[in-house]
């Protein structure tokens, strides 16, 4: 279990499409909940007069969520099977919680988009699919839920599949998979079902256990943001100078020629240390300490890359921003702090290009008032260069966080274009 692969996935969809129930079903059928948890939700369901155990109560933990029967905040759940470990981000469906969905989906390998079989593809389905595309989530699973309420009709499922596929053809989605399910009764969630004998595909759990995610990391462009310089200052390690951090992309090997940013000096990797000892090769997303052959000036916020493969080094950074702050809108010419990999620098909003209409992908260049949950294309001017890649190329070096200098609140998340 210690060495098994970790898969992160997020759920999305319209209100009452059954996202929380689906996660409850995954946890229940994979035997990943404790007996006392099950007894607690059985008692709550009985007290509320519900005819069946409400598995959504496993993830809807806030009092207001249980009262309204909706998801408001991102809920994280952890479970494991013999094949994989999983982290689930249960994200809300309401338009006013778009920022929460962006937060939950930003690190996901897989997005589960739920569609109510009775209602088909609705506005929220499109909105969340667009956000999944913007966030470059590698794998999209379209779960056509509540098949029990349409008599497990193959025709209904095929019509929804055709409608969504036709609409999604204009999005940047690398891998798309469809599965008909009933989260309430467990059809094709963990176990197969006689109710849909016409469906010849795999269950949702089989897909999650077997989808290939090894190539989701960028193993071509070598990126190593320096987080900390290790100098033990002891007799045993008197000449030890290591650069610690987490590899954001590529593969580093002992003896590789590297370039140091921003200085541009070159060196060779003398040694690669890890918590478990020295290794010959390291790759994303390993945390390692690199030792170089030359004593060069390198500190937190700098980056080690391959000699002939560098990121963009610029003070003008163009990003798609999702605005988080409810108390204050994005200020043109406003000053903020940018957090990017291990760097934090000050910036000014140089230009707001347009606001994106999440429903139609229309670029609104007239209304540039960017408030909570809005997504906009913005140019930032930073006080010193950032080492960035396009977000579609590297989700670590291609992402930023904006912080308000006065309140220290996280006000936006951005994807480098």
Image (cartoon, rainbow, N blue to C red):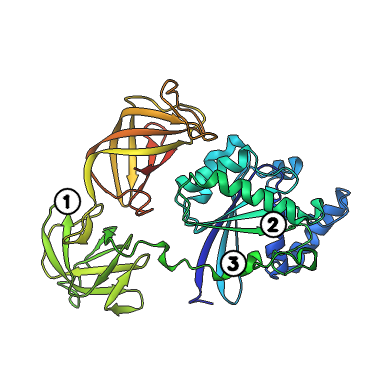
Tell me which label, 3 or 2, sits earlier in the chain: 2
Answer with left or right where residue 315 lies relative to residue 336.
Answer: left
Q: Tag 1's secondary structure?
A: loop
Mark 2 sits on what residue?
22
Label 2: how many Cα within 10 Å (few below 14, some 14–19, many 20+):
many
Disc 1 target residue = 262
Quadrant occupied by the N terminus = bottom right
Identify the mark at residue 206; answer none if there is no mark. Answer: none
Q: Measured from the top left, where is residue 24 in percent x and y?
A: 70, 59
Residue 301 horizontal/vertical position (percent): 25, 52
User: Within 10 Å of the Cα at label 1, are there few (<14), some (14-19), or many (20+) other Cα atoms?
Assistant: some
- Estimate the spatial distance between the alpha carbons at disc 3 and disc 2, rounded to whole Å: 15 Å
Secondary element at image label 3 = helix
Residue name at image x 89 percent, y 49 percent:
49
Considering the numbered disc 2 on the image, is that residue within a helix, a strand or a loop? helix
Left or right of residue 75: residue 37: right
Closer mark to the observer between disc 1 and disc 2: 2
- Residue 161 location (% of width, % of height): 64, 51
* Quarter that holds the C terminus: top left
Q: Is residue 67 left or right of residue 123?
A: right
Residue under pointer 3: 207
Task: Please rate how many residues cluster around mark 3, counting C-alpha atoms within 10 Å: few if below 14, some from 14 to 19, many from 20.
Answer: some
Considering every residue shown, the one lying at the far top of the view is: 366
Q: Residue at x 16, y 73 (%)?
A: 238
Residue in the picture at 32% in, 63% down: 247
How far apart, in angstroms, are the residues tagged by discs 1 and 2? 48 Å
Q: Position of residue 334 (x, y in %)?
A: 34, 27
On the question of residue 145 being in view, the answer is no
344 in relation to 278, above or below: above
When asked about the image quadrant of residue 400, the answer is: top left
Residue under the image location 35 percent in, 33 percent down = 378
């Amino acid at each position: 279990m210690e060495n098994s692969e970790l898969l992160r996935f997020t759920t999305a969809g319209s209100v009452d499409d059954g996202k929380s129930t689906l996660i409850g079903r995954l946890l229940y059928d994979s035997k990943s909940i404790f007996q006392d948890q099950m007894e607690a939700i059985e008692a709550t369901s009985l007290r509320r007069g519900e005819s069946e155990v409400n598995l959504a109560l496993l993830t809807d933990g806030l009092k207001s969520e249980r009262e309204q029967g909706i998801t408001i905040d991102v809920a994280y759940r952890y479970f494991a099977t013999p094949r994989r470990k999983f982290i689930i981000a249960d994200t809300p469906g309401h338009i006013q919680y778009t920022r929460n969905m962006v937060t939950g989906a930003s690190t996901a390998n897989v997005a589960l988009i739920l569609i109510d079989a009775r209602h088909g593809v609705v506005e929220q389905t499109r909105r969340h699919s667009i956000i999944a595309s913007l966030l470059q989530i590698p794998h999209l699973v379209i779960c056509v839920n509540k098949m029990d309420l349409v008599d497990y009709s193959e025709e209904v499922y095929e019509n929804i599949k055709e409608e969504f596929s036709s609409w999604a053809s204009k999005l940047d989605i690398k891998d798309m998979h469809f599965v008909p399910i009933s989260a309430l009764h467990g059809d094709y969630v963990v176990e197969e079902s006689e109710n849909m004998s016409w469906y010849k595909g795999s269950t949702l759990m089989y897909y999650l256990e077997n989808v290939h995610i090894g190539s989701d990391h960028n193993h071509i462009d070598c990126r190593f943001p320096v987080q900390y310089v290790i100098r033990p200052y002891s007799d045993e390690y008197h000449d030890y100078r290591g650069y610690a951090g987490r590899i954001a992309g590529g593969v580093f090997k002992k003896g590789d020629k590297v370039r140091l940013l921003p200085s541009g000096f070159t060196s060779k990797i003398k040694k690669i240390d890890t918590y478990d000892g020295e290794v010959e090769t390291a790759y994303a997303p390993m945390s390692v300490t690199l030792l170089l052959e030359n004593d060069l000036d390198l500190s937190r916020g700098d980056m080690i890359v391959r000699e002939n493969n560098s990121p963009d080094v610029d003070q003008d950074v163009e990003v798609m921003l999702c605005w988080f702050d409810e108390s204050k809108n994005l200020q043109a010419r406003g000053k903020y702090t940018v957090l990017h990999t291990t760097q934090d620098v000050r910036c000014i909003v140089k230009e707001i290009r347009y606001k994106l209409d999440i429903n139609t992908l229309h670029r609104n260049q007239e209304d540039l008032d960017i408030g909570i949950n809005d997504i906009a294309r913005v140019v930032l001017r930073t006080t010193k260069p950032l080492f960035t890649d396009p977000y579609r190329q590297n989700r670590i070096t291609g992402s930023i966080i904006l912080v308000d200098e006065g309140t220290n609140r996280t006000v936006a998340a951005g994807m480098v274009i």
